[in-house]
Structure formats: structure tokens, C-alpha cells
Amino acid sequence: MSETARAPRAPRFNRTDLARAALLLVVFGVTLGGLHTILEGAAWWVLSLSLSVVVFATGAIVRAILPRVPIAARVLAPPVAAVALGITIVIRFASDVSLWGFIPTGETFARFATLVRDAGYSITWQNVPANADESISFVLALGVGTLALLGELFAFSLRLPALVGLPLAAIFLVPGMTPEGATDGWFFAGSALAYLALLLAERPKRYVPVLAVGAVAVISGLVVPGWLPSTDITATNSGLGPSVATGVNPMLHLGDDLRENDKHVALTYSTVSDQPEYLRLVEVSDFFSKDWGPSQPFLDTDNRPVDMPRPPGLAVGVNTEKEVTYIHVANLVSPWLPIPYPASSVTGLTGSWQYLPNSLTIASNLTLARGENYTVSSVKIAPSPAQLLAAGTTVPAGLHDYLSLPPDTPRIIATTAARVTAGETSNYQKALAIQQYLRSAPFEYSEVAPVTDDYDGTGVEYVAAFLEQHRGYCIHFASAMAVMARELGIPSRIIVGFQPGHLKNGDDQGRHIFEVTTADLHAWPELYFSGIGWVRFEPTPSRGSVPDYANQSTAGVPPVPVPGTGSGSPSTGDHSGAGPQIDEGPTVARWLTSGESSSLFAIGGVLAALIVVLFIPAMVRAGRRIRRMRGLASGTGTAESAWRELLETAEDVGIGLGPTLTPRGVVARLQRVKGMSGGSAEALERIRAAVEMEGYGRPAADKALGALHGPELAKDLSTVVACLRTSVDEGTRIRAALLPPSLVRRSKRAVARFA
């Protein structure tokens, strides 16, 4: 045997196979792009697409190596692709703890277990869209790799490309199932079109059902997502009532929750003193990010909340009152536990919870607040005005993070703070002045204005917009006071939680019961004073209650004038403890931010979709007719195509022509149609002659036949078709155009074969 004969045969790639693999890759790439609503950046997409390339390319190589044993190639391709995928994942995530960098060891699997655990933590704590860190990328790689293997199995091994839609649906459903996530209709439409292209590549002649399914899928992808309910608040069967999903960052959607028409119970509580309390969830102190909110905290397992430290900065001489609060959480989907400040002990918890020493908030990496029943021992800090005045302007060391502001902070914040506090000497007086300024005219409480004026967000630029517009809700008032305080050198932070709620009928072992709902979600600032620690203020008019040490009507509280009024009295719109007074804004603005406009847009979208669907059969049928006419006019068409068009037109207008009729029998039947005389009858005879000559003529007649197939035959067909249409009434013509019976018949047959 020669050397040439002994040489291994090079893999032979089939162009069709490669084209289908490329199409499958495009389908996955487009569908994966829809995850951009829940994941930041593009690195995760590149990783996912790379893993898909590994799977599909490996399958193509296996089939190229075994071209003469296709059954073996179909069986071997998925497991070989799985091995290649596994090696790629090991190299990417655990090469340093693997043998030779790609063979997994015990340490490799330990690394994988750690990544899966950390992914759970990261998913719990991150906002949407989330940063695809190492742990999330690993879990994503496992999921995408598995789905790509299923795509390879369905498309090539089982040769059932329609089943590729299952892994695609799994990918696309992820954003809609994620709290705060959203589906992207355009990516869904693109994915549907790519999927249909894959089906057409397998069955190119069966385009009618594919186009019909594609039209429905694309329209659904663009219209239906707008109807889907928000995942922030969803009905459950837990017995705890509808869920209240604050998420890891309640600040992001606090306005949406407040604007929600249906208010849901978050929790109930009672206190030994029968007095209501503010309940804190989370501290926000980093004002540098674009969207303010808490990051995933480091939770020390030793920091069990059964024994919490003394609040930072609180001196012995400050007045405090002991309190015990019994809290019963409903379906509150939050990794933060609602508690009063400052708590000294929390007992009765069933999950794994730890406290954060600086903020004394309580959080968990593994547990949500829903269903928890616990008892909180706490104190109420009641500093006297004299003690707050005595704090002066002293700021203890270690509070730098609570004074930092981004370098691009708009100047209006500093100038406003300086103007409002002009003449005040202590930090306490400055805090009172800022609170009084924000609670007075021209400031108004409004949940609508920030939306209509496009400053419904968090960040220093939104604070600047609020100071110019003078209307907003609690997050704007709290943020403004916190940032203005930092501009004046006063440490500050924002707290997100619940205001006290309202009394509920009944009692808890003789104690008053307070009910807290989504309407009670609230944000307020806390400022730090030397010797006292963190102190709550309430700059939001018509929400919550102003503490005694900050209330101008309390004896000893220094009066502060409101700029422009010469008075220390708040505006008439200030009603401490009252319910929210929502300024609905102008009629157009109210309509734009209400459900009415979204409903009208949805109805308009549905009507547009119905119109498109209504005309699809007409467009398909017209396309077939135009294609045949052009073929005849150019000389490339056949008499058979003209005859088919004639028969289908007759069927569309309701003229029954049995399948057993010969061309002469068809002509005899059509000659009895109304209006079929003169030029129309002669044109019909010429089409019949062309069909018979094409089917039964001798080769010598080819020249004459070619003449019949030219533009003259196209003109004859147009004449006969026009006559058939005018032979029926207007209603029949409209029905024939919108839902052609000939197309329905063909579609039924195609769907039957496709199935």
C-alpha cells in the first residue's frame, strides 16, 4: 500500500451542514442577546457565544470525520461536544486547580461548588441589570452550554430542528421570570426570525406554515410583553398574601411601588408602648454610583442579631427609651429585615441573618424576610435640642465615607445649601434649616412630577433637577437633604424602609396592631452628631412624622426662618403624619403616567398586529400570482404555471372545478361563467392550447410553444383572471382576496406534511 493510501483522510465538511450549524449559532446568539435586560456589559454574551461555537463546531467536525457512517456521527457528536464544552469551562474557570490546566481534579469540583454558592449570593444581592461576575458567568456558562448541547442534539442528531425552540424558549423566559427584569420584544422577534430561517433551511419548500408561525411569533414578541404584569409584585399561593418585592435595592423602584394602585400588606407589628415606629431596611451611603443603592455586604456569621452592639456614637447621657416590638412579616421578598433603630437584640428568627455593625441593619445571603415572626428589643433615641446644639460642628474621625460626594456634583446643591443655612452656626441648626426649607413652599409632594419631568431616579444629577423643579416624593427629599448636609460638612446617609403604617382592627395580646403596606415604603435621611450618633430627620412634607427634636413647635428647638418668607412656619401644604397628598400634575402629564395611555398603546398595537395578520394571506397569494406573471412575461415561465394560476383563481372566487376535469373540460366549464365571451373566451382557448402542446406536443413544436410562452400568454392569463373576478359579487371578491381558498387548501396540506 502506498504512502498516499495510508495517509489519514482529511475531514470533509458538508457545506449544507456548516450552513445549518452557522444558522443555529446565529439563532443562539440573537436569543442570548435578549438577556441584556438582566446582565450588564457584553463579556457574558461573548463567553456564551464562544461556548456555543465550541459545541456546534465540535459537532460539525465529528460529522466531517465520519461522512460515510452518518448514524455513528449523529450518536457521537453530542457526547464529544459535551467533552469539548467541559474542557473549555475547566480552562476558563479552574485551569489553576486542574491537571495540565484542563483535566478536572477534586480541587476543580470544589472550585465549581464555591462558584455555584457565590452565584446564589450574587444573584440575591445584585440589582437588575446585574454585573456578570465570575460566579454568575460560571452558572451562565453551565446553562448556556447545556442548552447548546440540546440544540445540537435536536438539530443534527435527532434531525428535529423544530425542537430547537425549547432551549431558545428557556433562554428567552429568564428575563421575564426575574424580579425587576423585562423581556425585549425586538430580540424576541429577531430570535423568532432566525429560528424560522433554521426551519426553512431544513424544509425550504414548506414556507407557508413557517411564515404563518413566524408572523404570529414576531407579533407576539413585540406586543405581548407590554401586557405582561410586573414581576415586582406577584400573586402567590403561600398563604401570606400577594408578595411585596423590595429586592436588594428598594430605592430603584420605590416610586413605582408608591404609584401602584393595589397596595399589598408587607407586615404587621405591635409595640409594648403602643406607639408606632419607623422600620429600617437598608442604609445607602455611597453617592458616587449612577444608581444609588446598597451593594452586597460582607456578612460575618459571628454577627448574630441576638446580641447587637451599642449604636455608634451614642453617649451615655443621651435620653433613650426602651421598646419591644413584635413583628409579623407577610410575603416581603427582601434579603433585608425590617427593624426599628437602634435594635439591641432580635430573637425568633428562623433563617440565617447577620447584622452590619456600622448601620445596625440586618441582612441574609440565604434567607428572605417573608414569613418571619420575631421580637426586637430596641431603644428610642430622644436627644434634647440642647444636646444637639452642643454637638456644634465637630465631626469625629472615621466618618469620611459619609461626607464624600462625586467631583461632578452640580453646583446648585452647594449654593442652595449655603443660601438656606446662611447665618446658622451649628450642624444641628443647619440640619433644621434644610429640613424646614424642603418642607416649605414651593416644594410639593408628588409621585408623578419626577416621571413626567424625567428626573425619577437617584444620583446627584437627579437631586439637582429636584431642587430646580421643587416637586418629588420621599426619595428626592431624603436625597436632597443628605447631599446638602454633606456639602456643609455634616455626615449623612439615606435609609430606606417603612414609615409607621396605620392602626388595624383587633389587637395582639392587648397591644395595638399596626399594618404596613407598600404605600408605607419610605426613604428618610439620618445625620450624624458628635456624642449622639445617627439621628433621623423628616424632610418630606405630608409623609411620616417629624421627630420632637426637629419639630419647630417643640420647646427648645431653635427657630429657623424659611428663605424668602421671613417666617419659621412651614407651608400650608405641610401636614405631619397625614397621608400622601399626590400632586397629579397637568392633565396631559397625568394621562401619560397613568394606565390609560399604556392601555391605549396596547390596544393600538393589537389592532396593528391584527391588521398585519389579516393581510398576510392576501400578500402571500398576490406574491404567487406576481411571480407567475413575471415568469411568463420574461419567457421563463411555463404554460403549466399559467394553468395553475387560472385554476387557483377560479377556486378563490368559488367556481368549482373537479380534479378529474381535463383542460378541455375546464374550458367548457369556464365558458359558462358570466362575462366569459369574446376576447376572454379566446384568451382561455389559447391558454388551453399552450397547456396541451406543452404536455403532449412533439419536440418539433418547441419553437411554436416558446412563442406561446412569451408576453402574449401573460396577457391572456391577465384577461381570463380579470374576467373570473368580475363574474362574482363584491363580497366574494373581498373574501377571495383576504382569505384565498386555494391558499388555505395548500396551507392545510403543507401543515399536514410538516407535522
Image (tube, rainbow, N blue to C red):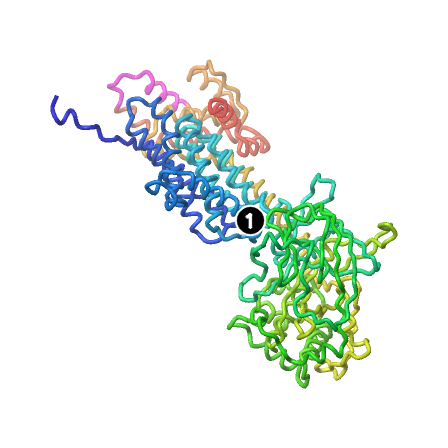
Most foreground residue, 465 or 224:
465
**182 left or right of 138?**
right
For the view shown, which residue lies furthest in the left direction? 2
Vertical placement of residue 482 versus 599, above or below? below
Disc 1 target residue: 121
Estimate the x, y position of residue 318 in percent, counting from the top left.
74, 72
Q: Determine the residue positioned at 70% across, 55% down.
A: 338
Amino acid type, residue under disc 1 in the picture: Tyr
Q: Which quadrant is home to the N terminus? A: top left
Most foreground residue, 247 or 219:
247
> Magenta region's main secondary structure?
helix
Q: Is residue 688 magenta?
A: yes
Most foreground residue, 509 or 616:
509
Q: Would residue 676 be visible to someone looking at this image?
A: no
**Dot 1 crowding, Cα within 10 Å, few <14, some 14–19, many 20+:** some
Quarter of the image for residue 242 reads top right
**393 left or right of 547?**
left
The magenta region covers: 685-702
Q: Secondary structure at mark 1?
A: helix
Vertical placement of residue 710 versus 556, above or below? above
**494 left or right of 152?**
right
